[in-house]
Image (cartoon, helix red, strand yellow):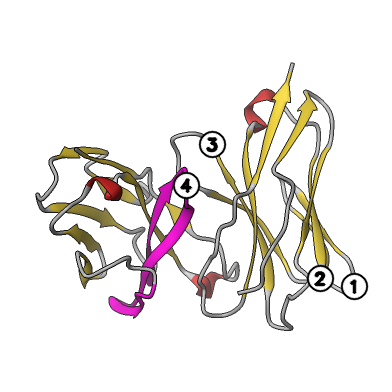
Amino acid sequence: DAGVIQSPRHEVTEMGQEVTLRCKPISGHDYLFWYRQTMMRGLELLIYFNNNVPIDDSGMPEDRFSAKMPNASFSTLKIQPSEPRDSAVYFCASSDPGTGASYEQYFGPGTRLTVT
Amino acid sequence: LAKTTQPISMDSYEGQEVNITCSHNNIATNDYITWYQQFPSQGPRFIIQGYKTKVTNEVASLFIPADRKSSTLSLPRVSLSDTAVYYCLVGSNDYKLSFGAGTTVTVRA
């Protein structure tokens, strides 16, 4: 398997623009997680899905952020409108707890977002 | 989620064993202890997970005392490529991970 795939790898946009980040989890994994990492706040869990259903979105910072998982092989994280403080690296991760290691999540390479 | 405390940084030399101790005084009965490694510009990578006593894999060992209020990740014979941030996490069956600041391990030649 190619691992978790994220696109784009880098995104530079202007304040006020809509940004869409994409993630393809590992095939067969039924959990998908979105994280954000900054120097100030570290690695934060934003939202996670189980079998395409959002389970916990308490980490989503505000209404400008939304996430969807229309099918088992694709998820998006959208920011509209974007602000400079959204600049961060966004990671997608997937897992299959049924295989035994409950907390073994596989992370993608991340999307580095810069909002100017 | 139980709070964890680990050293901010540690220095070591190639070939030495590195032991990182994590404190989790409020660990719950159902909680597992998990360690991740993160290299610059990459996502975290799962290293090891345990519930009690000792767990060993090809990368590391995890030692958990009987009271489970702490745990120690042991990296045998480190090399320069083991320079990374190491995170200790504690969680139960909701599968949520809460990453702290981690321990920056620097391995020198």
Q: Amino acid at mark 3?
A: Phe
Left or right of B6 on screen, residue B44:
left
User: Closer to us: mark 4 or mark 2?
Assistant: 4
Question: Start and end of the magenta stretch?
Answer: A30-58
Q: Is the C-beta separation of discs 3 and 2 under 8 Å?
A: no
Q: Considering the numbered disc 1 on the image, is that residue within a helix, a strand or a loop?
A: loop
How far apart, in angstroms, are the residues tagged by discs 3 and 2?
27 Å
The residue at the far bottom in this view is B29
Position of residue B27 measured from the top left corner of the image (x, y, whole percent): 73, 75
Specify the quadrant that holds the N terminus of chain B: bottom right
Where is mark 2, residue-wise?
A: B52
Which of the chains bears the disc numbered 2?
A: B
Asked where in the image residue A26 lies, by quadrant, the reply is: bottom left
Where is mark 1, residue-wise?
A: B66
Position of residue B97 measured from the top left corner of the image (x, y, whole percent): 53, 66
How far apart, in angstroms, are the residues tagged by discs 1 and 3?
31 Å
